Image (spheres, helix red, strand yellow):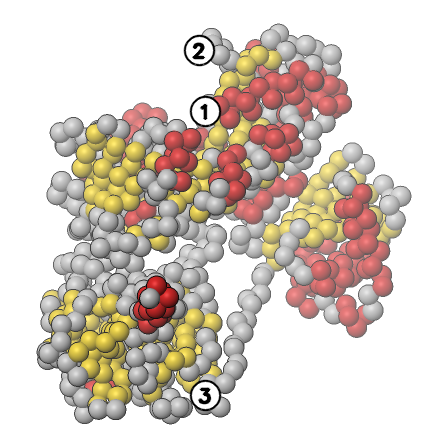
Amino acid sequence: MTPMKLLWLLLIVASAPMVPPACAASGPWEQPSAALAEQIAGILGPGQAHLILRNNSKIPAGEIPAITHSLEEALKAHGVQLSGAESANTIRITLSGNLRERLWVAEIAEGSETHVAMVHVDIPDARPSITLNQMVLRKERLFASPSDHPILAANQSDSSIVILYPDKLVTYALDPAGPREQNRLTISSRRSRTRDPRGILLGDEKGGNTIAIVPGVQCTGADTVPADPGPEHPVPGSHCQDSDDPWPILSPDSTNGSPKLKAFYNAARNYFTGVITPNLDVDLPPFYSAALIPRADGAGLLINGIDGKVQLAESRALKPIAGTRDWGSDFASLHSGCGTGTQIVVSGSGEALTDSLRAYEIPAQEAIPASTPLAMDGTVTALWTAPDGKSILAAIRRSASQGQVDSYEVDRVTANCN
Amino acid sequence: MLRQIVISCILAAVARPISARTRPHYGGTLRVEVEGDPWQRPGGLARRMVLHGLTAIGLDGTARPALAVEWKSENNDHRWQFQLRPGVHFHDGTSLNSTNVVASLTAICGADCPWTAVHAVGTSVVFTCDSPMPNLPALLGGDEYRIALTSAANPGSPPGSIGTGPFEFTGLSNGVLTLSANDSSWQGRPFLDVLEIHTHRSIRDQFLDISGGRTDLVEVPSEQLRQAREQRLTVVASPPVSLLALTISDSGSLANLNLRASIALAVDRGALFNVIFQKQGEITASLLPAEITGYSFLFTADRDLNKAHELRGGVTPPGLTIAAEGGPTMQLSAQRIALNLRDAGFNVQVATGVPQHIDLTLRLLRLESNQPQPGMESILRAAGLAIPVQGQTPAALYTVERQILFSHMLIPLLYLPRAFAISGRVRDLRLGPDGTPELARVSLEDAP
């Protein structure tokens, strides 16, 4: 052991008795301390021992005195009296960890023999922070997927949420204890899956039904959920059929008084072909996203081409939009009531592990930031306007850190005007 | 006039919308260079892209559905049943069924399979084992047991190159292996159209090619990671996934446990780490990296020459031979270990040519899972020790590992990362849990 390490260990051990009782409220450390002390006492029996503690984990240094105190108390409770370095017995405890868990390891040296004891310690979740500034975007997690299947779209009602996955449409009851699956509709497609799956969810014109569209398939699922049919019992009236029909590309709120635009989707890829109906009298390039934005003379169709260029189709012309350098592939319109009333909320880089959303206004041919970026807890994989138009829903992929799998969630994003 | 032109150009550049990052693009050819055989087991890139296993190892190291959608064990892990995924086809159009899966597995390991028998039962494949195999699903996700069609072969294609993977074999010419996107891949068509793998390229040539923009992805050995970064190459590196280890024969004079323990104490891991491997990875005396178990510090990696002499007890065994599997860096490491052992009183020669008898072998063992039990099994299997690991808790795993290491037939030395340098065209490259690039999800920035 290097002199520096020795000094550090001595400092840790020496600082332990200086912890006042009030600071030593062990909290989360009490249980693992007791469990480890029990194992140590089982090996050592009652008697004296010298305790050495070292921290090889990510536990903050400020927590170490409390842990030391907790361990000392637990050892004493099991009859192990702590003494100085002159003791024949040494308990060397290492606060360690691996990809999945925290691990506390005790090496108990009795003369020339060393025994080992271990306990695992649960790692509490870290809470994400929320950015605050001027016109402020806020996020609220609506749903965290219990599986690592990509979420393509979601619709929320008062007490349930419908989630569209590439191969199923699932309704979850939003119970206080967490989402509970109520029913599911399997989506079978004769087409191969794509590696960047996309899909949309919308209510049908008569209301009461959810329409789900994924490449090559259109499904209708009744929203009226039976009391508790169980996952094996799909809702009566739900069905899927092969379909190459164009996809509605405008969010429901923006269809009021506007032409209903549909776009043909390239089911073998991940973008719209550029062919839309009804025809806007302008040739559109293939694009990933489209949104209708208010203009002085009506509305314009904003598209994000697969070449990364953002253009606005208005007055039978396609106009480039500047200021979109930082835009990702997804955007949706938000009727916030702030500023001009409508903003475009845009994802950042499609590759970044921690993506962001930012609101923009496009008064002319340049996108002007209307909010500061809102940091998301992963990559935005889909973005759409909620049925009320006043919020945005975002599907987020939380990329796997080492030793974990990707996970998906749905966040609702709203704006506060300041 | 010139000033006006310059200003106009600047204004035009400012006004022009600049391309943003977008969803991954489909299309294009990814050029890859490798030093070895892309079909090798484990870790061969072509093998990984063309063939699937019954299971796949997820990023969290657990076995996940692949050609099998679900599985269950019975009789205390002595019998396993894997239900096959429906609607999957080999690249030549042949349907995947339990018969061709069994044929493929039998062709792979014949009479030396880790299971006792494998049978086709309807749409399932059933394994029976004399001893419990709790980690069989993870084992089947490794490179060893990928499923290839055995009943047919493309003219001119390597044997076992018709699979169900995201890419299919289309040609091999002048050392360049060409794989094309499988449009009907059950996982979805990959973004790339073509994968072009230039085989048997020296590391030096790979560095020259990536620096000159003539390729997109090259290998970076651990000992050259620092150099690659100094050359400002874009490097993607894995956590430690390759175990540099010394295997010791237990025959002849080395049947003496104390002599093997003495050898273990005489090796100077610090010198290997600092000098040869340029401080990449981590020093270890444990079979698994610290981040997988959390207890690796319990196995001391310090050199102790006094104890080594003491354990040798004055016995000077007859001359020992050490060999290294791999290229010049491994040879250099073997020479350094030979020097270490001479310091401890052993007479060790580095093998040249094809020696008659090898006492010590320096090897690089691939960790195939970052889950403790299957990970340890993969290391032991690679070392030729097929020992099922059944400990489920860290404490139980530690006990198993301690027993194995106490035999001093396998001496862990260093854990090293796998690394690759990529060109600016490459998007979304991620390395699997064993450090192999996942090329099916890669796309190209400049794809059409």
Chain for disc number 2: B
Query: Are discs 3 and 2 located on one and the same chain?
Result: no
- Which type of secondary structure does the marked residue at label 3 adopt? strand
Tell me the residue at 54%/14% (across/down): B350
Tell me the residue at 60%/22% (across/down): B336
In the rendered image, is residue B243 in sight? yes
**Mark 2 residue type:** Val
Q: Earlier in the sequence, mark 1 or mark 2?
A: 1
Q: Which of the labelled discs sits on residue A416, or is there none?
A: 3
Is B156 positioned to the left or the right of B432 in the image? Answer: left
Residue corresponding to mark 1: B326
Q: Nearer the viewer, residue A168 or A88?
A: A168
Is label 3 in contact with label 2 (beta carbons under 8 Å)?
Answer: no
- Which type of secondary structure does the marked residue at label 1 adopt? loop
Query: Are discs 1 and 2 located on one and the same chain?
Result: yes
Q: CA distance from mark 1 to mark 2?
A: 14 Å
**Mark 3 residue type:** Asn
Residue corresponding to mark 2: B354
Query: Are discs 1 and 3 located on one and the same chain?
Result: no
Tell me the residue at 64%/18% (across/down): B339
**Mark 1 residue type:** Gly
Q: CA distance from mark 3 to mark 2?
A: 76 Å
Q: Callout 1: 10 Å neighbours few (<14), some, many (20+)?
A: few
Q: Is residue B9 above or below residue B427?
A: below
- Which type of secondary structure does the marked residue at label 2 adopt? loop
Q: Which of the labelled discs sits on residue A232, or is there none?
A: none
